[in-house]
Amino acid sequence: MKKFTLQSMWAISFSLIMFSGVFTSCSNTDDPETPPATGEKSPYITRVLDFRPAVGQFVNQLPEYKEGDTQEDMNRKVLEAIGNNKMGMVSLGGFGGYIVVGFDHTIENKSGLCDFRVLGNAFYANGASDYGSSEPGVIQVCYDANGNGLPDDGWYEIAGSSYPDGKETWIDLATQAGNDTQTILDYEITYYRPSAEPGAPTEQYIRWEDNQGGSGYKAMNATHLQSYFPQWIKEDKITFAGTRLPQNGIDQSGKGTYFALYRFGYGYADNELNDKDASAIDIDWAVDSKGQPANLPGVDFIRIHTGVNQENGWLGECSTEIMGVTDLHLTNVSIKSQTIKN
């Protein structure tokens, strides 16, 4: 998760969870934050169907949880923050935490062009263009083929630059730093609710285990001392699954004080500056579970999950932040997809 002091620091120097069917709190009721029908399509998010962050330092803060809030309350708060071009921000927490959003129309798939952009808060380090704070979110899309207004027609992953085998320009640097640089398409992780809240910094706060034989802890830092476990979720453990990306945080200081989070090539959320072409997404990049092109005519729903499982020193866990989604065609933005991939 990016801390809001990072820029000044750098200037100085359906299947499991969604995959296994956890659409438990999807809502198809009209939300009061959705503007009344005017006959015009909105380029922006008009629905939040589900919001289930993993553990993280801004969980229960972005958006704010208040005692008694239900899943539906949290979905509404997310829509109030990032829907309809509000440009607030929500955090998805560590690996696997996700959000599912919808629109009042189908985002058209136009051949050769990027079709939408997911807005995040990625930025470059001072004087750099390949690293800074990039916390990539894996994007999936769904086309409402049966027209029932629900994301039950199958999900397809946007095959970004690390799909399926993690060929990024900085991979060798990350390998030398001891990072796990594999892309794992069927990664699964479980987080366990702590028996008590420490209320003080600790490196062994929330335990996790994955399906690769790995385990560890999410740390609590000195800046955020609230619970990092989503408080509206009552289970004592939460499991997420999906594509896990290479660890892109490299400690340039060698002392844990200066982590550079390297930018992936293309195809992810919260990875590139919002005004750069490489933050845009072409629906034609969507693939099925076998890696074959999905050939969708458009998308009605978008799902984003945090793609990296990594702690980055005082920065804390890698966690994707979302500020909105924009239909590029309705905002008259034309970006050729070939210029991004090549």
Image (cartoon, rainbow, N blue to C red):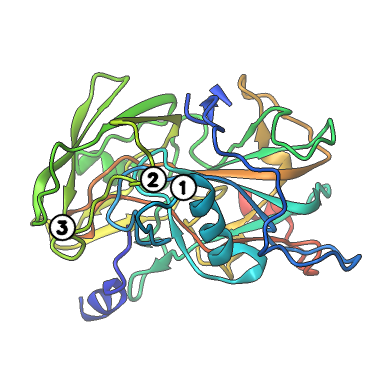
Residue 114 lies, with reference to residue 138, above or below; the image says below
- In this rendering, would 240 be left or right of 72? left
Tell which circle, 2 or 1, labels the residue nearer the N-terminal end.
1
Binning the other alpha carbons within 10 Å of mark 3 as few (below 14), some (14 to 19) or many (20 upward) gives some
Q: Amino acid at mark 1?
A: Thr
Q: Secondary structure at mark 3?
A: loop
In-front residue for pair 246/78: 78
Q: Secondary structure at mark 2?
A: loop
Binning the other alpha carbons within 10 Å of mark 2 as few (below 14), some (14 to 19) or many (20 upward) gives some
Residue at the right extreme, as displayed: 39
Q: Which residue is mark 2?
A: 232
Residue at 62 percent across and 19 percent down: it is: 290
Q: Secondary structure at mark 1?
A: loop
Q: CA distance from mark 2 to mark 1?
A: 6 Å
Report x, y in % for residue 134. 40, 57
Residue 77 lies, with reference to residue 193, above or below; the image says below
Q: CA distance from mark 3 to mark 2?
A: 22 Å
Q: Amino acid at mark 2?
A: Trp
Residue contact between numbered discs 2 and 1, judged by CB atoms under 8 Å: yes
In-front residue for pair 78/182: 78
Report x, y in % for residue 54. 36, 42
- In this rendering, would 286 be left or right of 265? right
Mark number, residue 70: 1
